[in-house]
Image: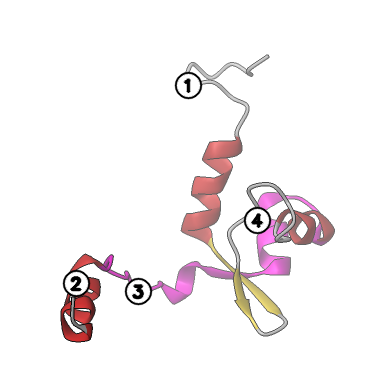
Amino acid sequence: MSSQQLAETKQTTALPISPLDPSQILTLPELAERLKVSQRWVYEKSRRRCQDPLPVIRIGRYLRFNWLDVSEWLRRHSNVSPSGRRAA
């Protein structure tokens, strides 16, 4: 396969990138306040070494969080069953 064909294949199979809504981007203190947890908890859960870390956008040394991604992460980690009862 030529390099041109390979480039065309990559372009057609690439997933569309949806733009981020700036109003959904939170700083670490804003996210901690919204979740009613400490900033340290948010930082620890967003570390790369954490198993299934909190989704984070790293901009140099700054951490930003997309609220929609964090909401989905919370749903996956919720210990509440669909019936509304806590899972054992």
Task: Give residue 29's position: percent from left, percent from top.
Answer: 73, 67
What is the C-alpha distance between the residues marked 2 and 1? 41 Å
Disc number placed over residue 19 in the picture, else none: 3
> Which label's residue is closer to the chain start, 2 or 1?
2
Q: Check contact, mark 3 vs mark 4: CB within 8 A.
A: no
In terms of secondary structure, where does tag 4 sit? helix
Between 59 and 51, the one lying in front of the other is 51
In the rendered image, the quadrant that contains the N terminus is: bottom left
**In the figure, is residue 50 to the left or right of 83?**
right
Disc number placed over residue 34 in the picture, else none: 4
Q: What stretch is highlighted in magenta?
A: 14-39
On the image, which quarter does residue 19 sit in? Answer: bottom left
Amino acid residing under circle 2: Thr
In terms of secondary structure, where does tag 3 sit? loop
Amino acid residing under circle 4: Arg
Amino acid residing under circle 1: Pro
Closer to the observer: label 3 or label 4? 3
Residue highlighted by disc 2: 9
